Amino acid sequence: MRGYYSKASRRARSRAWSSGKESSGRGIKAAFITAGILILLSVGLSLLARHVDGFAEWYASSVYPIIVNTVGRLFGSFPFAAGEWLLYIVIAAAVILLIYGIVKIVRTPKSRGAYLARLFASILCAASVVMSIFTLNCGINYFREPFSVKSGLPTGEKYTAQELADLCVYLVQGANTYADKLNPDSDTVLTDNGEELAADCIKAMERLGARYGSLAGFYPQAKGVAFSEFMSLTRILGIYDPFTVEANYNQNSPYFARPLTICHELSHLKGFMREDEANFIAYLACRDSGNDLLCYSAYTDALLYALNAFRTVASDAVYAELYSYICPQVKAEFAANNEYWEKYNTPVADAAESVNNSYLVSQGQSDGTRSYGRFVDLMIYDYKMNIAA
């Protein structure tokens, strides 16, 4: 009897091992098939967006709003930046699985090949899921009709150094006016007063949406990142998370720039992914909000961009004369801003900027991070058409 049960047990173990091997093989095959389908879907949609006129605009205005109203509304209900904590969970899980894999390979060398095959299939499948979510929630929108076209700006026209100077004067006047309203007789920077800044920014975007239909609709709550120090280390003011459809911002950054940053990220939630246009939309939203703090942010932050551009075309004397008209409070903001970011001039920040540049180029913005400078161009076109006219 002992010999009989021993043989039966061996046969059972053999059948179980064979069955487990077949099941593992089917799982690996299914993972590869799933990854292949998702990769083909992502590549196909990206090609349509890049090469078929009207497809990206149709997607951004018809399909993408459904994602914002479902995924964005879901994660927007969380009182914290869900995407940030999801990232930490993924990193922790990856570390645990790596340790587990190393231990398994060391203890059971005979199953090393099968385990590595499953691991590769799992990684490929996960990467394809990430790729498809990014494409659906972000990538296609890079190729939609530009907001500058929708707003009727004469972007094909060239402008002169004098027109750039006129814009700077206009922005100086606006920054000085709202500095005096917020903190008269002071030469100190503004600090966070605990007001509902994110809610005010949504109101500003909704107000602009009444003028431009492409900006109308639901906006999830923008949220500050808990570990904002990391964002500062990489010189990031804000980020749109395509995986949770959230607008997140750096809570440690200079306060005067925060409203423009929040509205910038909220504009991405309306499918406008180009950085220059997101800045321009944020500028319009804050400038025309009727909220003194947001107006101050619009003029002061925009003035930084305009001054940087003006410095490249003006003599030192002309630049110094223009700068002398800026009020002490705004000058204090600029000084504090320079001091804050000077701390983060590190190799980590340089590497992050290089990665961001490569990312922007891959999404059709051929001038990479220099595309942020086109924000000044859009402001000049707006000034010529709507302010100076």
Image (cartoon, rainbow, N blue to C red):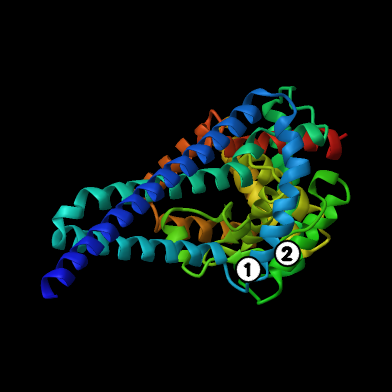
Q: Residue at x 27, y 58 (%)?
A: 15
Res. 70 visible in picture:
yes
Looking at the rendered image, the quarter that the N terminus falls into is bottom left
For label 2, count other residues whose C-alpha is less than 10 Å away and answer few (under 14), some (14-19) or many (20+): many
Amino acid under disc 2:
Leu
Q: Are marks 1 and 2 in contact (CB under 8 Å)?
A: yes
168, 30: nearer the viewer: 30
Label 2 belongs to which residue? 293
Amino acid under disc 1:
Leu
Q: Residue at x 78, y 55 (%)?
A: 205
Q: Is residue 122 above or below residue 16?
A: above
Q: Return the disc, 1 or 2, that comes first in the chain's sequence.
A: 1
Residue 62 image point, x, y percent: 78, 42
Res. 184 visible in picture:
no
Residue 269 image point, x, y percent: 68, 51
Label 1 belongs to which residue? 190
